[in-house]
Image (cartoon, grey):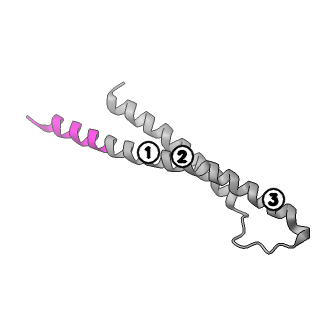
Amino acid sequence: MSPLGWMASVWGVLTGILVVLLIYRSTLTMQEDDQLFLDDTKSAMEQEQAELMSKVNKINPFVKVLGAASGLMFLVLAGMFIYQGLNNTAP
């Protein structure tokens, strides 16, 4: 396998994991409310909201790192592709 193919495979795996995490995070926050009006009888809802935010906060660093890694690998892949194309067309 060529280095370009290997890099494309790694980029695809990283981007696939990123997409799965983004979908999971969006399903977690789908029913999240911007405001909660709680009284003493709604304390279970408050705890559910805190647990939900805890899960989202655990996922966010992975999303940021994978997003940056995917973007960087895409730029490297594009650079390698352009470099290889320029070298192949030179006489």
Q: Is residue 50 above or below residue 16?
A: below
Circle 1 sits on which residue? Answer: 70
Tag 2: amino acid: Leu
Q: Mark 1 and mark 2 in contact? Answer it, CB < 8 Å.
A: yes
* Disc 1 residue crowd, few under 14, some 14–19, many 20+, Cα 10 Å: many
Q: Which residues are magenta?
A: 78-91
How busy is the neighbourhood of tag 2: few (under 14 within 10 Å), some, or many (20 plus)? Answer: many
Residue 39: give x, y in percent of width and height.
87, 73
Label 2, secondary structure: give it.
helix
**Based on the displayed image, in which of its 4 quarters is residue 31 positioned?**
bottom right
Which sits in the foreground, 80 or 53? Answer: 53
Q: Tag 3 or tag 2, which sits nearer the N-term?
A: 2
- Amino acid beneath label 3: Gln
Outermost residue, right side: 41
Identified at 33% across, 41% down, the residue is 77
Residue 26 percent coordinates (x, y): 64, 57
Residue 33: mark in rendering: none
In the image, what residue type sits under mark 1? Ser
N-terminal of the two: label 1 or label 3? 3
Residue with the mark numbered 3: 47
Q: Nearer the viewer, mark 2 or mark 3?
A: 3
Q: Main secondary structure of the magenta part?
A: helix
